[in-house]
Amino acid sequence: MLLAIDIGNTHIVCGIFDQNRLIANWRLASSHTQTSDEYGTMLRSLLFFQNLTPENISGCIMSSVVPPLTPVFESLVHSFFNMTPIVVSSKSPLGLTLLYDNPEEIGSDRLVNAIAAFTHYQRSLIVVDFGTATTFCTISQTGEYLGGAIAPGLKSAADSLHIKTAKLPKVDLVTPPSVIGKDTVSSMQSGLMYGYAGLVDAIVNGIQQEIPGPAFVVATGGLSQSIVRISKTIQEVRPNLTLEGLAILYSRHLQACG
């Protein structure tokens, strides 16, 4: 079985694959104060509730956009699973041509999303990932990573409104029934949800105008299901796209090793 780990700024998503099939996944809070032993203990407990043990895991691959947490999870994998994880970077055998001024600047989560989407769809794509940041990745029909856009994440914007203002409360990220809010909470929810749907549609439409032919638009990330209901451009949601990309990369690694 494969352990896939995606380390993000807000959450760490862990998935277990059995014969390329995702059988379990969990979200842990990203914390710079947690030790490898603490994370390892949590992960071992989660495995236990799936009737699994560390001995069931035969390989591990991880992507990380939080440099301080990368060695924490490398140590965890060494200590609890007795193996060295594959860490994804722009130098990994991605199967994509990176048309980016400095490929090392591309977040590994964006690369993994692009790999998964292009493997599944084999066509021109725009991948929108709703995480701590909202990222847009553009892939050509021949597998060229063309670049994209990065905007503040929806939750980051909501938290900023609450923290930076004296009277605005913290609100749940749900779509209100009307764009015209009748109280402070619904007004904030309208601005956040409909505003971000508009942001997504504007950037996607802008990208579509700069590439030859229409691109298929796929979304992922924790808040993608909420935005897809009011976005005019998102065509499909794949909640586990990043984990799927990690599993694809691991399979390629095994093939390359013979």
Image: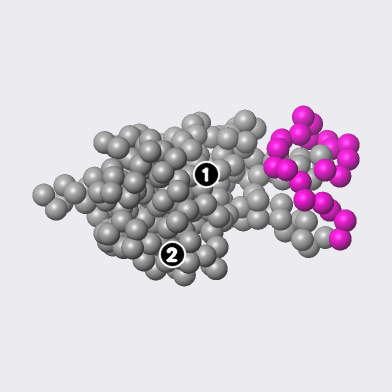
Q: Amino acid at mark 2?
A: Ser
The residue that appears at 14% across and 53% down in the rendered structure is 257
Q: Reply above or below: 212 against 134.
A: above
Q: Secondary structure at mark 1?
A: strand
Mark 2: secondary structure: helix
What residue range appears in magenta?
A: 166-185
Looking at the rendering, in which quadrant would you find the N terminus? top left
Q: Are marks 1 and 2 in contact (CB under 8 Å)?
A: no
Q: Is residue 190 left or right of residue 230?
A: right
Q: Which mark is residue 178?
A: none
Q: Residues within 10 Å of mark 2 (few under 14, many from 20)?
A: many
The correct choice, above or below, for 152 with respect to 252 in the image is below
- Percent position of residue 76, x then y: 38, 62
Give left or right: position of 19 versus 125: left
Secondary structure of the magenta portion, mostly? loop
Instruction: Say few, some or many: other residues with alpha carbon within 10 Å of mark 1 (under 14 / 14 to 19 / 20 or more).
Output: some
Residue 221: assigned label: 1
Relative to the observer, which residue lies in front, 166 or 107? 166
- Asked if 76 appears above or below 115 in the picture, the reply is below
Closer to viewer: mark 1 or mark 2: 2
Residue at 50% over, 41% down:
220
Residue at 50% in and 56% down: 8
Front residue (pair 33, 185): 33
| Residue at 55 percent of width and 50 percent of height | 131
Quick check: can you spot residue 80? yes
Q: Position of residue 38 (x, y in %)?
A: 48, 61
Along the viewing direction, whichever of 214 and 181 lies nearer the viewer = 181
Q: Is residue 113 a member of the stretch shown in magenta?
A: no
Give the x, y percent position of residue 156. 65, 55
Q: Which residue is mark 2?
A: 36
* Residue 142 visible somewhere in the drawing: no
